[in-house]
Amino acid sequence: MTKMTLASYPHLLGFEQLERLLERAAKSSADSYPPFNIEQTSDYSYRITLAVAGFAENDLSITIEDRQLVIRGRQQDVKSDRVFLHRGIASRQFQRSFVLADGVEVGDAIIENGLLHIDLTKYEPDPIVQTIKIRKSK
């Protein structure tokens, strides 16, 4: 059985990048750490909230890479003479990605009470109508 791709459909021209974005989104959805919420705060704004208890502001980075919002967390290695009888709090590094549609811009990022809030705003593009002039062949 062959895999159907967007390129298999003759009326969908130039959507190869969309297919790559969908594949990236499917790969990133398999991760479960850290847990997150996505809420719609108005008709054109959203908020992503990640549970990052134990991570300081300096341990987190937020970047946009090829229309993908990437949040990384890596706690600093603190060498100490602490002896744990039980260690149930995860201190592992993570990377969480979200694919952004055209017209979505990242706003503020706020950390409070172990939660990282990232605000997004969606701008509706103005409709573009373009007329193509038809020339006679030579």
Image (cartoon, grey):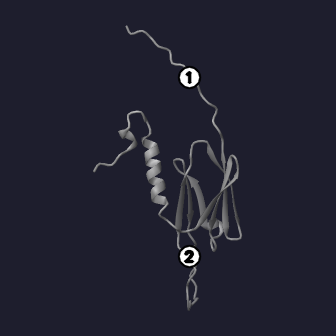
User: Residue 61, relative to residue 20: is it above or below?
Assistant: below
- In the rendered image, the residue lying farthest to the front is 1
Which amino acid, mark 2? Ser
Q: Is residue 26 left or right of residue 73?
A: left
| Location of mark 1 (residue) | 130
The residue depicted at 58 percent of the width and 54 percent of the height is 63
Q: Is residue 121 left or right of residue 129?
A: right
Q: CA distance from mark 2 to mark 1?
A: 54 Å
Q: Nearer the viewer, residue 132 or 113?
A: 132
Instruction: Determine the secondary structure under disc 1.
Output: loop
| Residue linked to disc 2 | 91
Instruction: Residue 2: give x, y in percent of width and height.
Output: 29, 48
Residue 137, percent across and down? Answer: 39, 10
Residue 22 image offset from top left, x and y in percent: 46, 50
Q: Do the CB atoms of the residues marked 2 and 1 lie less than 8 Å apart?
A: no
Q: Nearer the viewer, residue 128 or 71?
A: 128
The residue lying toward the viewer, choosing from 81 and 49, is 49
Q: Is residue 126 above or below residue 71?
A: above
Q: Residues within 10 Å of mark 2 (few under 14, many from 20)?
A: some
Q: Quadrant of the C terminus?
A: top left
The quadrant in which residue 73 appears is: bottom right
Three-letter code for the amino acid on which mark 1 is drawn: Gln
